[in-house]
Amino acid sequence: VARIHKEFQEFKQVKKIIEISALKKTNLDELLGSIVELLPDMPPYYDEDTLTDKPMRFFVSEIVREKLFFELDEELPYHAAVYVRQYEEKNTLTKIVADIVVSRESQKGILIGQGGSMIKKIGQTAREDIEKFIDRKVFLELHVKVRKDWRNNDLYLKEYGY
């Protein structure tokens, strides 16, 4: 341990050496205190009331994706992307049109479900959560699109936010 201390002390950037153990939880408070002490004073990057730098479309797509994970089994949600094509705030409600993109026709059938039951359930639960999130009424229109091998296509990946 003493040899390690000596080696690190040669670096000018090293301000302090603290031996810790995450398993034994030793010196963690000292580590945290030292980190805070050594942080530079700077003005905030964002206003105090700013929660995120992500657009609302991002959160809408994540809420819809979450519903895919809750409602569908196996790997299908991992093969799906959600792309919000329209997000328009009107007087009394917010209109959202989104595509759920999958790679194969068979996946599209699973997503739609018998008589549209699955896509209806996904849309309804997503709409309820989006309304809670933005605190206003939402009209949510979901479409299922097949884009063969979209996960291997740079253009699609960029368009869908990956």
Image (tube, helix red, strand yellow):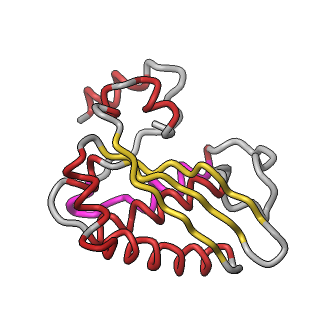
In the rendered image, which quarter is residue 152 located in? Answer: top left
Image quadrant in which the N terminus is located: top left
Instruction: Please determine whether, in this image, residue 129 is positioned above or below residue 144.
Output: below
Q: In this rendered view, identify the residue nearer to me: 51 or 108.
A: 108
Q: In this rendered view, identify the residue nearer to me: 146 or 35.
A: 146
In the rendered image, which quarter is residue 120 located in? Answer: bottom left
**Number of numbered tags placed on the structure image:** 0
> Residue at image x 39%, y 65%?
66
Apparent side of residue 99 relative to residue 84 in the rendered image (left or right): left
Q: In this rendered view, identify the residue nearer to me: 33 or 110.
A: 110
Residue 63 position in % (x across, y down): 47, 65
Image quadrant in which the C terminus is located: top left
Instruction: Please determine whether, in this image, residue 132 is positioned above or below residue 102.
Output: below
The reply to whether the magenta stretch includes residue 26 is yes
**Hey, which residue is sitting farthest right in the picture?**
91
> Residue at image x 37%, y 25%?
153
Apparent side of residue 118 relative to residue 39 in the rendered image (left or right): left
**Hey, which residue is sitting farthest front in the picture?**
115
Residue 5 position in % (x across, y down): 34, 31
Apparent side of residue 24 relative to residue 88 in the rendered image (left or right): left
The reply to whether the magenta stretch includes residue 25 is yes
> Residue at image x 28%, y 31%?
149
Residue 14 position in % (x across, y down): 49, 29
> Residue at image x 61%, y 78%?
131
Instruction: Please determine whether, in this image, residue 146 is positioned above or below residue 119.
Output: above
Q: Residues in magenta?
A: 21-37
